[in-house]
Amino acid sequence: MNSIQAIPVHKKIRASEHKMGSAVHRYLPIIGILSFLLLPWYGLEYGIFDSTLEELVEAFAWQSTNFAIVPLAIFALFLLHPWKMIPRKKAVLFSTIAVVAGILVIFIGSGILNESLGLGAAVQILVLCLMVSTGCAQLGFLRGDAFMSGAIIFIVALVMLFIFYPLTKIFIQMLYTTDDQFVPLQFFEVITSPGVGRIVWNTLLMAVSVGVSTTFFGLIFAIYSVRSTSRLRSLIKVFYILPIITPPFVVGISLILIFGRSGSVNDFLSFLFGTGGIFIPEGMDGIFQASSYIYGFPGIFLAQTLALTPVSYMVLVGMVSAINPSLEEASLTMRASRWTTFRKVTLPLIRPGIANSFLLGVITSAADFGNPLVLGGEYDVLSTEIYFAIAGAQLDFGRGAALGLLLLFISLSVFLMQKKWIGKTSYVTVTGMQTSGNVIPLPAWLQRIMSVIVVSWIILVGALYISIFAGGFVKTWGVDNTFTLAHHIELWGNGITSGGWPSFLNSIIFSLFAAPLTGITGVLIAYVLIRKKFIGKGFIDFGTTLIFAIPGTVTGIAYILAFNEAPIELTGTAFILVVTMVIRSMPVGIRGGISALSQIDPSLEEASLIQGAGSFRTIRSVVLPLLRPAIISSIAYSFIRSMTTVSAVIFLATAGTSVATTYILDRADNGDYGVSIAFGSVLILTMLFFTLLVQYIVGRSRTEHHVKTK
């Protein structure tokens, strides 16, 4: 795999890179100077299009003395090229260091002076970064590959700006009180304050319980869908899609409609055994009283299990279907029973999938904000406590930062334990060579037990989605079940600028921007991590690992602390929401890209490079076509996750950038369950169409092995 590093650079590549290097002294400085003259250096409170002419003119760099003089001087120097007499390598090194220093001066100086950077500053910084990447290539970084140098600098900038910088702001904010007093031990004061220990225990208990339950049910459904001979297994592929494309808290709302005090179950039991029930003699008190038993731990646990089990299924089903049947046949040949083969051969081979599934369940449960808010009652968890510390009457960023750091510590601890449990053992069963053998079906008794579990799950999920779609067409569920279109008319019948239209369209637009960015960036990061060796690779690897471990609630609080003040003010803009969606979905794109690249022989890329194609052309013409299914799947998942995300965007969305999930959650928090359910059903149908379209395009992998149905 690392043989790509040793390929000599072809003369054509050298000529191409030399031509690209000459652009540094011609075109890039000119672009930078034009951005200085034509674009506002300072950030505008209402944006370029909504600001007055006077505000726009005042935002230009040439209107005042500021740090814009630094990039302007660099651009002028590159045009004049005063270091012609210096040896080329020293000149390139000097100029590259000067550009890096210029970037740091802009950020640090603007932060000290509390000046917000605008569009002109962003373009100039981008030009400076391109100049740095070209300079690194001229110095021989990655054998003079300008494209890969630029890609790595882009990734490093992404990791530093949107991961490490926001996390640093959490650490800093944790040291200050609401009146900006420096309190170095505030973190310990917060975590030892009354009630925090109980909240941490609640969060851990819920997260571990949900991690175990989702992994258990996900494994059952994955094994059943691949190894069962029953025709029921085809229903799993239909019902597992629904919770994935449903905002998690919509499942919680539907549980209230079914199991709440005025829910269907309570109404039915009251009809049978309540006072005046058909089985209770007249004049006697009923033996059943409607209660709110769904609120608290049971409700949150059930809602999260229903919402996250399909994700666990997706993680596990690929590994189960890709197991080489010959390994199990060898066990049976040695006279082991089917149960022994399943326990000692099949299960150990899917150990990484079990660990990943548990990790996803724990982290997602700990970060879930919607279900605890809707169903929590008096059962407090860290995610809701963080939200109320910032968005509630407390407005205590120090407390929110301390609790966010505590939640991050829990997630990282689980992540490290998962890595330790998997270890360095090889679990490879797909070698690229044609394998033979029949997939071993489940033992009959085990298949019967799994069938009961699957049928029960399908009935429960079916009831939930009947309530979701029916709840939008009744006046008040459980109180007045008269048919009505009032909820949908309120959402969609009063013009495209009112009701649910603005947030619905915002969600679609933001997700359509975020999805392809996630797919492309994820594959680029995966390619750099798998195929390239360079100084600082560990930094990128650690940074992208952090993305996976950081809960959404922590991302939201980190972004509101980092991007709500100079030098980078992005809160309240659509841009920060798109960035949040991209960062939150990035782990799927990266892991999907790594898995797909691991199955591609590096010799294909070597052949392209030997023939004189550069890295960009090789990736575009060789790698990307081979990664098409992985990229499309990553884009699809990113679109769905962006449409349903709430834990991070709840801190960042404003009235003008409201998205569907925040709108639904706000209406549900006000008790408008009919409107919330109606909006949720439309959102589900939208994403169901998108998901089925993607599945049709991608098709089925040739590495999957299934048992034939009877």
Image (cartoon, rainbow, N blue to C red):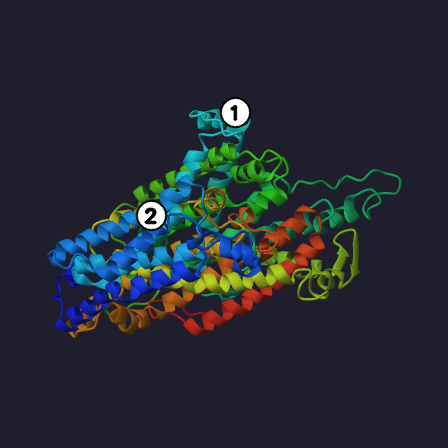
Residue 395 appears anywhere in the view = yes
Tell me the distance, in whole angstroms, between the alpha carbons under discs 1 and 2.
Answer: 32 Å
Q: First in sequence: mark 1 or mark 2? A: 1
Q: Tell me the residue that label 1 is attached to.
A: 193
Q: Quadrant of residue 678?
A: bottom right
Q: Looking at this view, is 630 or 299 the one in front?
A: 630
Q: Looking at this view, is 585 or 443 the one in front?
A: 585
- Which amino acid, by three-letter code, is at mark 2? Gly
In the image, taking residue 533 as reference, residue 362 lies left or right, namely right
Residue 351 appears anywhere in the view = no
Q: Tell me the residue that label 2 is attached to.
A: 543
Question: Residue 2, image x and y in percent?
Answer: 17, 59
Local secondary structure at mark 1: loop
Question: Residue 280, image x and y in percent?
Answer: 82, 43
Dot 2, how many residues are within 10 Å of its Cα: few (below 14), some (14-19), or many (20+)? some
Residue beneath the point at 27% across and 64% down: 599
In the displayed structure, 183 sits above or below 326; it is above
Question: Residue 551, image x and y in percent?
Answer: 45, 45
Question: Residue 571, image x and y in percent?
Answer: 51, 49
In the image, taking residue 692 as reference, residue 538 lies left or right, namely left
Q: Looking at this view, is 119 or 287 the one in front?
A: 119
- Which amino acid, by three-letter code, is at mark 1? Ser
In the displayed structure, 373 sits above or below 441; it is above
